[in-house]
Amino acid sequence: GQERQCFFGYFRCGLPTSDYQGGDVCCNRNIGKTICSDEAGVEAGKREFCLTPALRGTIPVGFGNTPYLEVLDLSNNFLAGIIPPEIGSLSRIELLDLSNNTLTGSIPSALGVLVNAAVLVKGNSMIRGQHKDDEIAPLSLCNNVRGFDLFRDPTWCPPERNLLRKFYFE
């Protein structure tokens, strides 16, 4: 996971905290496992480094070119930007977890084809609906993707809108 871990600077990280000038830091645990973090996840105290490893940046559009991908768990990171609509082409995906990041923009309607997937987006407070001030998910996502984590949230998936769609198509 992306848990904060602290290490005695010189012995575990090969660098006294007083000499740290910024940049990436890697430290070793007793069991030989190395933990690294970029500068944004490094806290240098008097004698110890505390690292919070995480992914940063945007979600690559290229994930849409991995048709056999079944699980894409990018949760609990510092990913920013939009959710690429190309992710909707992941026809075999069973879990798409984008929760607890800093994603922005609207939820792409292309995700509505992921009918057999759990689509998790909670914890991204800057995600919005198709229009700037609303919090309404695409109808295709609310109606087709039973594993959508905001499905039961009436702000994102208003029941009356879903009933209107059902009435319209009957």
Image (cartoon, rainbow, N blue to C red):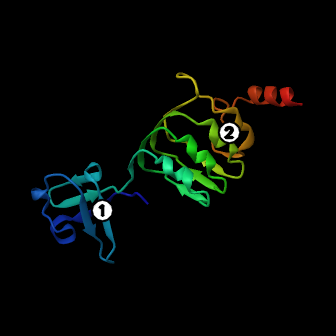
Look at 28% across and 48% down and name the residue there. Answer: 40
Q: Position of residue 98 (x, y in %)?
A: 52, 47
Q: Position of residue 148 (x, y in %)?
A: 66, 44
Q: Quadrant of the N terminus?
A: bottom left
| Count of marks, rendered view | 2
What is the secondary structure assignment of the residue under circle 2?
helix
Q: Indicate whether 142 appears above or below 5.
A: above
Indicate the quadrant where residue 131 lies: top right
Using the image as rendered, state which of residue 77 and residue 11 is in the foreground.
Answer: 77
How packed is label 1: few (under 14 Cα within 10 Å), some, or many (20 or more)?
A: some
Give, as a three-letter code, the residue at label 2: Leu
Left or right: residue 169 compared with residue 96: right
Which residue is under mark 2?
A: 141
Indicate the quadrant where residue 35 lies: bottom left
Which residue is under mark 1?
A: 36
Q: Quadrant of the C terminus?
A: top right
Give, as a three-letter code, the residue at label 1: Cys
Q: Position of residue 144 (x, y in %)?
A: 74, 42
Left or right: residue 31 compared with residue 68: left
Q: Earlier in the sequence, mark 2 or mark 1?
A: 1
Residue lying farthest to the left in this orientation: 19
Q: Indicate whether 30 appears above or below 135.
A: below
